[in-house]
Image (cartoon, grey):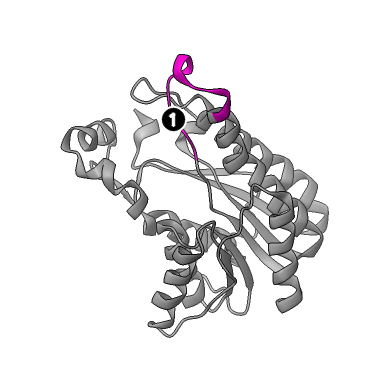
């Protein structure tokens, strides 16, 4: 089993489904987890849930990583408390969806700000503090690899494609310093934030269309891979994107 004992792990979006699951699993593996979320109440709810399991989640909520000042402060707070970064998990994101003819300029900027800019800002400010052997783990999406006729994703496809491409370049630049960079591209994942889609039988059937394993993804499906990729067991893996989609892209 991968061990992350005493690794300093920064995870964004710890108030959400995947972020909470990541904080829990990394902490169970012995990592010291420092998180944040745009909504302070959601982060604090995760703090309490983990405390009930005897686990600790550090950091505070209401951090807007699309704002470079907030992103730099989040990194500085972690360094002030722990002195280094072993793993940066750029998990948080937010997007707007719509077909191109209906998609506003504000929708475009909202999505690029909250899915691409914040990955760059967090990584930029963390980069000087990432230890030799450290890892940058970015959240991509199957939207980086395919379009869809079901839901307009023009900005989401662009930003997640950018995250996957950025990851490859981070791997190239980080190699001389012993920093690995990898990305994970999930298909549809069931979380509290996507519950409304799953509750609609027609939408759920659309989501399952083409998924070879005939089920929707769970947060644990993504996080299990993240734990491995962040660990020393994956020390020869860098610059790659890993799809977690139940076989959807294979069809």
Q: Quadrant of residue 127?
A: bottom right
State the residue at coordinates (33%, 24%): 150
Instruction: Indicate the position of residue 167 as horizontal and vertical percent values.
Output: 66, 43
Per the image, label 1 sits on a secondary structure element best described as loop
Left or right of residue 154: residue 216: left
Determine the residue located farthest toward the bottom in the rendered image. Answer: 54
Instruction: Indicate the position of residue 19 as horizontal and vertical percent values.
Output: 47, 60
The one nearer the camera, 240 or 194, is: 194
Asked whether the viewer can see residue 177, the reply is yes
Position of 151 relative to 121 (above/below): above
The one nearer the camera, 246 or 219, is: 219
Count of marks placed on residues = 1
State the residue at coordinates (29%, 36%): 211
State the residue at coordinates (69%, 56%): 71
The one nearer the camera, 29 or 53, is: 53
The one nearer the camera, 124 or 213, is: 124
Instruction: Indicate the position of residue 246 as horizontal and vertical percent values.
Output: 33, 42
Mark 1 — residue?
97
Left or right of residue 143: residue 198: left
Instruction: Indicate the position of residue 105 as horizontal and vertical percent values.
Output: 58, 24
Number of residues whose C-alpha sits closer than 10 Å to that of mark 1, classed few (under 14), some (14–19) or many (20 or more)? some
Quadrant of the drawing holding the C terminus = top left
Position of 247 relative to 138 (above/below): above
Q: Which residues are magenta?
A: 95-106
């Amino acid at each position: 089993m991968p061990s992350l004992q005493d690794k300093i792990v920064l995870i964004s979006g710890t108030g959400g489904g995947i972020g909470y699951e990541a904080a829990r699993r990394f902490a169970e593996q012995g990592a010291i987890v420092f998180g944040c979320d745009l909504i302070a109440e959601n982060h604090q709810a995760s703090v309490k849930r983990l405390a009930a399991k005897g686990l600790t989640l550090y950091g505070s909520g209401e951090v807007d990583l699309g704002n470079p000042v907030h992103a730099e402060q989040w990194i500085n707070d972690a360094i002030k408390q722990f002195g280094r970064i072993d793993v940066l998990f750029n998990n948080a994101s937010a997007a707007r969806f719509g077909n191109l003819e209906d998609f506003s300029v504000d929708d475009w900027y909202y999505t690029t700000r909250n899915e691409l800019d914040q990955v760059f800002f967090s990584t930029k400010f963390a980069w000087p503090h990432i230890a030799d052997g450290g890892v940058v783990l970015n959240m991509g999406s199957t939207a980086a690899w395919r379009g869809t006729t079901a839901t307009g994703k023009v900005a989401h496809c662009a930003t997640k494609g950018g995250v996957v491409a950025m990851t490859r370049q981070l791997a190239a630049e980080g190699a001389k310093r012993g920093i690995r960079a990898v990305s994970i591209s999930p298909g549809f994942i069931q979380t509290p934030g996507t519950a409304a889609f799953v509750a609609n039988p027609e939408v759920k059937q659309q989501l399952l269309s083409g998924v070879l394993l005939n089920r929707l993804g769970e947060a644990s499906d993504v996080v299990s891979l993240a734990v491995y990729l962040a660990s020393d067991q994956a020390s020869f893996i860098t610059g790659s994107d890993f799809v977690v989609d139940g076989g959807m892209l294979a069809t």
